Image (tube, rainbow, N blue to C red):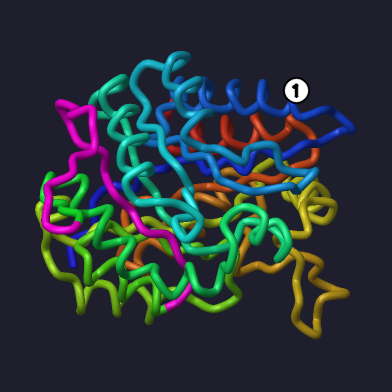
Amino acid sequence: MKIKPLKLSVLDLVPVFENRDDTYALGQAELLARTAERLGYSRYWVAEHHDMPQLACPSPEVFLAHIGARTERIRIGSGAVLLPHYNPLKVAESFRLLASLYPGRIDLGLGRAPGGTAHVSMALSGNFLENVRKMPDKLKDVAKLLQGSYTYEGEPVGARPDPPVPPEVWLLGTNKKSAEYAAEFGMGYVFGQFMSDVGGEEVLRTYREEFVPSPMCPEPKMIVTIGVICAETEEEAVRLASSSSALFRNETPEGDSAPYSERRLLVGTPHTVKTKLEQMMELYGVDEFMLVTMVADYGKRLRSYELLAREFGVEV
């Protein structure tokens, strides 16, 4: 398999650090998006979470409208809209509107996680497990709405407006089931390595082998999302990683000597991290990585992205 030159993108969970408030965190997210564009990153995606005090974005589509107005070129998208909670028509309308405002720049990333506690999920959309069971039908409906072929009770229903360039559609996941869905409905697939202690080789192979071409995605497209912490020295990078988010905590028996999972999080100098990414690129057969950096210092978070961009040949 021929691998294209490696591309880097950003996934922002919009964390609330340093005893700051949500408004400050959203401002730092905007700064990260503008910085990512300046540094030459391919995409800036924002996640969806509900009633989590440490994460400030429950509505990616609203925040993306803000980010789109403050950037010019970088692709922007959701990582992800949690589809079990929502009506496919409303999702398609929201992202077609974004794609009309910012043509050729919008990505619709879809997921099936709850994004909050059981009670939050019930307050948001009722029976979450029942909604997850409907996920294949919802994915099918989103695809039809974006392609202009959706009907309700035999009558055509359209998702307006009609953008000059439709949003790219991606399904996010950490297992074979999500890969099978992405393959069945002809969508791009994003493997969340930063949330999994299992390697993605088999998951990505399943997606490639079962992929069915669609008008949205005529051939398989894959991204791997991985945690990254870069610093000028290995010691500083390890120090930052040791005090970073519980998202990357090592849950294996050797956790005392390795406080973070080396499968979920790449730590080191820019050269070290670049080498690890290039090894993963060869192992997984992908040419794009989406980076999650959860350092409890907004300045050091930005610096991590800057250092890696410089290592890949971008002047900062």
> Does residue 121 lie above or below 79 as drawn?
below
* Mark 1 surroundings within 10 Å by alpha-carbon count, few (fewer than 14), some (14 through 19), many (20 or more): some
Q: Nearer the viewer, residue 5 or 143?
A: 143
Residue drawn at the location 42% of the way across and 33% of the way down: 41
Residue drawn where x is 20% and y is 78% of the image: 209
Tell whether 126 sits left or right of 182.
Answer: right
Q: Give how far across and how far down residue 4 sits, in percent.
A: 23, 51
* Amino acid at pointer 1: Tyr
Quadrant housing residue 129 = bottom right
| Residue in front for this viewpoint, 168 or 193 | 168
Q: Is residue 164 magenta?
A: yes
Question: Is residue 85 shown in magenta?
Answer: no
Q: Is residue 45 above or below residue 24?
A: below
In the image, taking residue 181 as reference, residue 48 lies left or right, namely right
- Return the x and y of residue 187 as percentages of the image width and height: 25, 58
- Please say whether residue 315 is visible from this viewpoint: no
SS at mark 1 in the image: helix
Residue 314, picture quadrant: top left
Quadrant of the rendered image containing residue 164: top left
Q: How many marks?
A: 1
- The residue singled out by tag 1 in the image is 24
Residue at 40% across, 33% down:
76
**Residue 243 image position (x, y, % from top left):** 84, 52
Task: Identify which residue is drawn at 51% across, 59% down.
Answer: 276
Q: Position of residue 207 (x, y in %)?
A: 28, 73
The answer to whether residue 267 is left or right of residue 109 is: right
Q: Quadrant of the N terminus?
A: bottom left
Residue 211 visible in image: yes
Per the picture, the main secondary structure of the magenta-coloured stretch is: loop
Name the residue nearer the viewer: 241 or 80. Answer: 80
Q: Magenta segment range?
A: 153-175
